[in-house]
Amino acid sequence: MNNIGDYALIGDCHTSALVGRDGSIDWACFPRFDSPSVFAKVLDATSGGSFAVTPRNVESVTRAYVDGTNVLTTTFRTAGGVVELTDCMPVAPMDPARPAAVKPYRSLLRHMRCTEGSVELDVDLAPRFEYGAFVPRFRLTSQTSAEIVGGADALWVTATRPVRLGHERVEATWRLARGEQVWLDVAWTQSHDERPAAAPNLRHRLQDTIAFWKAWSARCRYEGHHRDAVMRSALVLKALTYSPSGAVVAAPTTSLPEEIGGGRNWDYRYTWIRDATLTLISLFVLGFTDEAAAFKRWLERTGAGRPRDLQIMYGICGERSLPEMEVPHLVGHRDSRPVRIGNGAVKQLQLDCYGQLLQAGYLFAKAGGAITEENWAFLSGLADVVCET
């Protein structure tokens, strides 16, 4: 089982996935960050579900993101050759009129290419919907496609080489020689929807995704020290942004423990005022003003009403009620129980969030952002609440 530090993040600004060093996708939710999981092996190696691409006889592994993107390339050197695995959650090309908006295809796209010798790959696609609550139905629809359906979810598998049914999973074994490649796309829909139209060209979809992220990164105006690290941090923050609302999640996961074996395992797939305002400031300073403005709009609408009713956190579309419950059938990351969904901290009093909002307003205005009279009335009301508390 991968350690937490072995995972890399990919995402489409609606949801995200964790890719292990071993080529296994062990966490993904569709269609939103806070939706029930499709893959949750990170929380239960047996019943959580995963999507593994595993070369045989691996000797070493290196990983890197394609420059300026959230597209991940994992290079496996095996006893017989070298294979590159490129993973992304594909998105449509950027709309220059709405650079903060992101159109997802709600899928996981995996590309395998042999660059030296020959390599044999095993594919094991074993989703377990709704936090591993049950095993869905698996059915081949052609030699190179399959459907996986159960409850409210469906996955549609498209490959450029044959796949087969295994025990409660879709499997494949592919041998690639130097220069050969294979594409594998797994798209999500609601279970009552028809199969989505097949991508006319998966290569173009990957190229469009790379182009989107490079165009987004090009908007960064930071040219100071450690620019590469700053840019990578900005890309992570963008990946944690829920594009339809502008909200930013604190983390893409639930119940990863503060301490292995401990019980402080919380669901962070929501928007904390404190954390999100720091993100707003960071993106604004780096030149991503459209994202900062989108979050400001989300905050204005989510926090609308009396300042004293402001919560420390909300759902990504402004939901105020986030009931917390435990998921007893998942054992937790390395037996760190319990696994929780929802977050009961929503009703806590944490005065620092008021200060963060005031600081964000100050820095936003200092950097040239527009603070309306309504904004000022709300901010001054926050100061009154703190004085009265």
Image (cartoon, grey):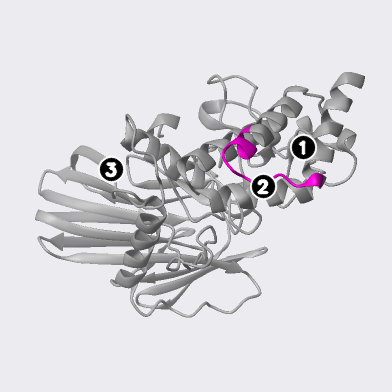
Nearest the eye: 260 or 210: 210
Mark 1: which amino acid? Glu
Element on which disc 2 rests? loop
3D distance between C-alphas at marks 2 and 1: 37 Å
Q: State which region is magenta.
A: 363-373
Q: Which of the numbered marks, if any, corresponds to residue 64?
A: 3
Q: What residue do we see at 21% from left, 65% from top?
A: 181
The quadrant the N terminus occupies is top left
Residue 323: quadrant of the picture: top right
Q: Are marks 3 and 1 in contact (CB under 8 Å)?
A: no
Q: Is residue 223 left or right of residue 140?
A: left
Mark 1 lies on residue = 324
| Relative to 317, residue 258 above or below | above
Dot 3, crowdedness within 10 Å: few (<14), some or many (≥20)? few
Q: What residue do we see at 66% from left, 32% from top?
A: 362
Nearest the eye: 381 or 79: 381
Q: Is residue 244 magenta?
A: no
3D distance between C-alphas at marks 3 and 1: 36 Å
Element on which disc 3 rests? strand
Q: Which of the numbered marks, if any, corresponds to residue 370?
A: 2
| Relative to 294, residue 268 above or below | above
Dot 1, crowdedness within 10 Å: few (<14), some or many (≥20)? some
Task: Tell which tag, 3 or 1, sits nearer the viewer.
Answer: 3
Question: What x and y, as percent, mark residue 216?
Answer: 42, 55
Element on which disc 1 rests? loop
Q: What residue do we see at 48% from left, 48% from top?
A: 17
Q: Is residue 171 visible?
A: no
